[in-house]
Amino acid sequence: MSGQSHRLPSGGRIDRSKTVRFSFDGRSYEGHPGDTLASGLIANGVHLTGRSFKYHRPRGITTSGSEEPNALVTTGEGGRTEPNVPATMVELHDGLVARSQNRWPSLSFDLMAVNSLLKPFFPAGFYYKTFMWPRSFWYRLYEPAIRRAAGLGTIADQPDPDVYEHSYAHCDVLVVGAGPAGLMAAQAAARAGARVVLADERAVPGGHLAGEAIEVDGRDSAAWAQGICDELDGLENVQMLLRTSVFGRYDGLTFGAVERVGDHLGNDSSGDLRQRRWTIQTRQFVCATGAIERPLVFGDNDRPGIMLAGSARHYVNQYGVLPGRKVVVATNNDDSYLTARDLARAGADVTLIDSRREKDVTGHALLPGETEVRYGQCVTQTCGKLHVSSARLADISEPDHIRSELPCDLICTSGGWNPTIHLLSHCGARPKWDSAISAFAMAKVENGVHMVGGAAGTFELQKCLQEGVAAGVAAASACSRKARKPAAPKTEKLPEYRIQPLWRLPDTISKASASFVDFQNDVTIADLELADREGFGHAEHAKRYTTLGMATDQGKLSNVNAIGVLSELRGTPIAETGTTTYRPLYTPAALGTLAGQRQGAEFRATRHSAMHQWHEKNGAVFTEAGLWLRPYYYPREGEDFAAAVKREVLNARSAVGMVDVSTLGKIELKGPDSGQFLDRLYINSFSKMKTGRARYGVMLREDGMVFDDGTVTRLADDHYFITVTTANASGVMQHMEFCHQVHWPDLDVQFCSVTEVWAAMAVAGPKARDVLSRVVDGIDLSNEAFPLQSVADARIGDAFVRVLRISFSGELAYEIYTPADCGLGVWEAIMEAGAEDGISAYGTEAMTVMRTEKGHVAGPELDGRTTADDLGLGRMMSQRKDYIGRWLSQRSGLTGAGRSQLVGLKPITNSDTFRMGAHLVTEPGTIGPDVSQGHVTTSVYSPACDHFIGLALLQDGRSRTGERVYVASPLHNEQVEAEVTGPVFVDPDGERMRG
Amino acid sequence: MQIPCPWCGSRPLDEFEYGGDATKKRPEGKKQENMEAWVDYAFLHDNVAGRHKEYWQHVGGCRCWLIVTRDTRTHEIIKSEFAVPQLRSNQR
Amino acid sequence: MRYSLSAIIRNAATGHKHWPKVWKNPEPKQSYDVIIVGGGGHGLATAYYLARNHGITNVAVLEKGYLGNGNIGRNTTIVRSNYLCSENSQFYEHSLKLWESLSADLNYNVMLSQRGALNIFHTPAQRDAAIRRGNAFSLNGIDSVLVTREEVKKLAPLVDCSPSARFPVLGGLLQPRGGSVRHDAVAWGFARAADRRGVDIIQNCEVTGFQIEKGRVRGVETSRGPISASKVGIVVAGRSTLVAQMAGLRLPIESHVLQCFVTEPVKPVLDTVVMFAAAHFSIVQSDKGGLVFNGDLDGYNSYAQRGNMPVMTGVAESAVSFMPRLSRLRLLRHWGGINDMTPDGSPFITRTPVKGLFFNGGWCYGGFKGTPASGWTFAHLIANDEPHPFASGYTLSRFETGRVINENGAGPQPGRH
């Protein structure tokens, strides 16, 4: 127990039989299981825990919960470094390492505290008025200095070794908050048979009861809560989620939550689950989130040793630590009398300062006889350096006149309690001012939502329990689970909660010292006064102007105080001053947790074709297209990219090559109206195409731009098979489903995506027929029996194959489709059969070279801004039928002069090269909106031409054949002269593919 | 947000894809004079603040296109039915 | 009171008790030369430039709620001018030039921070598309640099540039002059400067109807009574459809939620604005230390200024996958703004079929960065009844002709842009 100077000799709900060691700022301390870092620090007499954001004021532990604005630390080391962690939410474990932040060189001696001296020059909004002279100083001097001062903690310098996951929970009733009301609601709903999820951000149940010394149902309140929790935990229809912070409510009663699975265990092996994100879908929601205390605002109310009153007794009762021995409790409400009582019982010397008159107070009956109470007084100012040392007191009627100065090492402050209505407001409901409790509360809630206890503005324990029971029964019965209404347990009689708001003391006080409304962001009453003076008095304006409520606690302690202050400054009722909007997240959540398992390598799926192993084994370099990994090229020993691609192309053009085209989208259609359906989707017609034939087709979007292209194959009268581009595979399917179900439900057609069902490969080159003839059974592949655009079913070995004679490369070519699980075998069989003819695999780049030589369009040309006519496909557009995109493609802007049209390009000097993305200009070196007349969509070195060739979209390009243009890439400082040509460079008459 | 699918039951938002205003009808007829109707169909929007009939596809489920009535101010879903009229009578 | 060093010192010495209101809150007059409907960034900028460039000061800006409560204060504060389409690039480049002198012009520090905007690409196809864009920027006189993976590492050490990343970084396209601006300050700066030139900024004054006679606008009906004017500009992005409807206009606009995300503040880890081609995702670190993200649209028509969870978690997936060191940094808050989305992703600054009634809206993702140029060109249009050359393509009729300004090539569904 050595060193735990502030640990009480007994009491608290910690495990005193064990000791855990932890460190803070390099010093080693001891605590017990059940402690938080905050209670452990208090036990060891550590009061200074951090520095504020702007003025670097010394700060200490202010609360005992997730609302903590001041005691933020960095925990962990290396990849586990976690900045801005509230010490109040860290469970002590052996080996815990924590450091203070935002100070230099040390926490107790922080040079940046000089900001505090410059405070007169740094009021709210000072940035906007200054740093403008001279102009260049802004970006050379001021802004870099402001940026350097940014932030609190520092993020990890390496990746996180821990693991995260995402789970779903579905339930009838979600209860958030395991305090008295929440426990009762969960119990009542569970007993009625409802499926219940009960979530609470703390490690122990009971909510504030875990930190009280009162009786419920004749038992100690914490033990009672644990008992209910144990009962619920034993029920099959209840899922208890402790250490789980419900951070947001989304439309349709969907909730997001973070469960701290491993943090408190202190694991340091990599691969352990650290946190789990939950998506909770419920039919009924019981909001039992309790209430959060707000501080009083007085001079220098931010020193270490100034703590919320409720939190102070929480430390005494739950953790058995005494945050101070000479205590001033400053309040305006009756709840703080419990604090005075509990601290006095624990041996502290307590003076209670109540701003109200004695006759308005109900709490005094609680106090031990020797406790001094001063009514009608307030704390106006505090003294101390790194810890509070005294409080100055004055009469509330005469705050300028200091009546006395009380030495103290703890000031407990309470300005009242705010219902925690975040989850009630996230979906748009606005709270109303409730003058009975001097706080914002929800006047009504949506269907399926119940609010109980502190969250509903009910601060009387007996009533909280009753509301919980009633809400549990009502929620269960809304899910058709009927129950008798059980009676709520009886509690100790506590004084009635009464409050008289005290928003601020007069100007004169705030002038002499700083009265903080928002601790972390250092927003004072003077800042709010200035904001109001300058016209930023609306709550939203004041927030944005002063940064009030924008710190990591999101204004949990400050927002309502600020609204109270502004309402007084403006002389308007609080209801008219406006509130700021409650938004998720209720408590911040780590990005890694929110991402769950979908991160790193699992960020997105990686798709492999059936032949992927072969490609890997044969040294393919891959490129990604629509999440597929496709072979880009297959370099051999000593080959670079260009050499490999050239070899692959030359081999296909002179012998035979094979490329994996499994990534093409594939859709199969059946039904008597299939042909008519396709006629309405494509610009060309397929209903008249003969069975056993295949043809190129183009689809438009409804706005007349080209959507996609591919091959349409007729397998039978009522049976078609189409391929679509890899990139649009899912988009085309959805489009077809929309057209069928929405536009033409009368058409008798069924279709289904079979992209993953089929592996596909193209065999191309003058020897393609020879090679395939050796392995394909069941088709006569001769030119006469199986000419271009033929389709037939056959076998390769035991595998079923469908053979299409179509050509993207311009060579004699066949596409082979086979069930995916046969893909590798068929590929290898063809490779083996082709060995004697020198078959080799080629990648997507060789495919691009060959299609460019042939002037075939692909992704770079189909960029969503081109029409069929732009691409030279205008003649395919049928004049005899309606199809998607037909009418809007006839708008003047899509047909008139000035359209960019597909052309070919070749360099004037054969050795010149140009690149994709270069632009075409006629006056080199000029700049302006009309300089670019087009751009190079595709450019490749053509082995057939032995120089670079390109496809380009050029304004009025088709009429400019023979013209010379400059191909400019100013990004690379490149510019070459080129001639505009037709888009086809190799075999313009198509003899090779017909051969 | 949960969308009730007439086939699959109530399912989370991420299973669905949005298809826009469902009150629009693709213009009939093939006449060029109809251009005004086509421009209206493809580009102009009522964009109502309130109850909005809109298309959704249950892409992560039965792949049916649905007509969902949803309040664009509150995201409350009032009704959900098949886009294909013939299916609506079978709706459960 | 002009902001100056001596004013700062004088006020510091007197406890800041003498700073005047940044703008007055006058009662509306019965009539103005020009009424601007909408007290957001664009409306205030329009009023300011009407006064500054055209000497028209008898102007009222009517704001339904509090000034600047729309998208001017709900965005990720990024400014850049790297647009592919010529119409857009001239417009946004004009805007960026105005940003560069705005603090001095307004005598209000909007905290422009030009630390560069970097678009990262991952595949050869994305690289080629980036080269096309970069060259288009260069030919339009916009600064643009192609950078290698090594340079990406230096510019943004936070980004995982290892080959084992799910989407390995291949390189990037950098606009060195891109950056960020303190968003709220823009609204306040324009408001103050317009107010100083005599413009009436009237909050809590909702326009409930338009007075239109014989095809010409005569004024507006408001929650505070009728106000007449022969010229009225509608600048209410997010509610464009609803306001224009009161004047009988039907628009090519859908309202969609775009979310923004901010983390807890941490010490500087990222200087540049970074965008990734592998996912719709951008990130910038504010001067306060929070990392600010943007993701996809929520994807359905909405007037509710709140976002859904799938987009939020999707953004977290992108953040930790592209920048694994962010894993334990906590997301603090996320919120939604309502974007006017159009069929080609480009805005409107245009006359309407009603004479004297002008419309500005449809900003898609470009609203914040376009604020000064939007005000500049809209003021020009209202003053002269002639479009400014930099905004002449932003008409409502471009869908009839098909002369659209389609920045990303997506189809006509507004939510796809």
Image: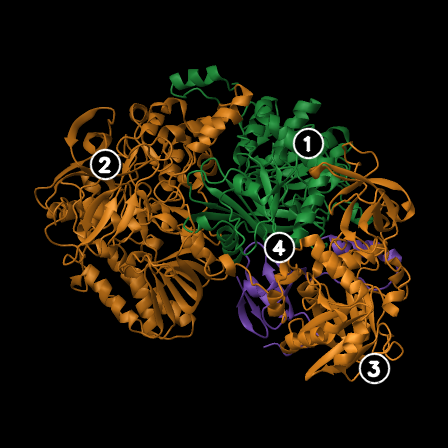
Q: Are marks 3 and 2 on the same chain?
A: yes
**Dot 3 amino acid type:** Asp
| Colour applied to chain C | green
Q: Position of residue A679 (x, y in %)?
A: 82, 69
Q: Position of residue B79 (x, y in %)?
A: 59, 67
* Residue of label 2: A355
Q: Residues within 10 Å of mark 1 (few under 14, many from 20)?
A: many
Q: Residues within 10 Å of mark 4 (few under 14, many from 20)?
A: many
**Closer to the N terminus: mark 3 or mark 2?**
2
| Colour applied to chain A | orange
Numbered badge on residue A780: 3
Q: Residues within 10 Å of mark 2 (few under 14, many from 20)?
A: many
**Dot 2 amino acid type:** Ser
- For the residues labelled 1 and 4, say whether their Cβ atoms are less than 8 Å apart: no
Numbered badge on residue C301: 4
Instruction: Please determine whether, in this image, residue A670 is positioned above or below residue B34.
Output: below
Q: Residues within 10 Å of mark 3 (few under 14, many from 20)?
A: few
**Closer to the N terminus: mark 1 or mark 4?**
1
Q: CA distance from mark 4 to mark 2?
A: 52 Å
- Chain coloured purple in this rendering: B
Q: Position of residue A721 (x, y in %)?
A: 75, 74
Residue at mark 3: chain: A
Q: Secondary structure at mark 1?
A: helix
- For the residues labelled 1 and 3, say whether their Cβ atoms are less than 8 Å apart: no
- For the residues labelled 3 and 2, say whether their Cβ atoms are less than 8 Å apart: no
Q: CA distance from mark 3 to mark 4?
A: 57 Å
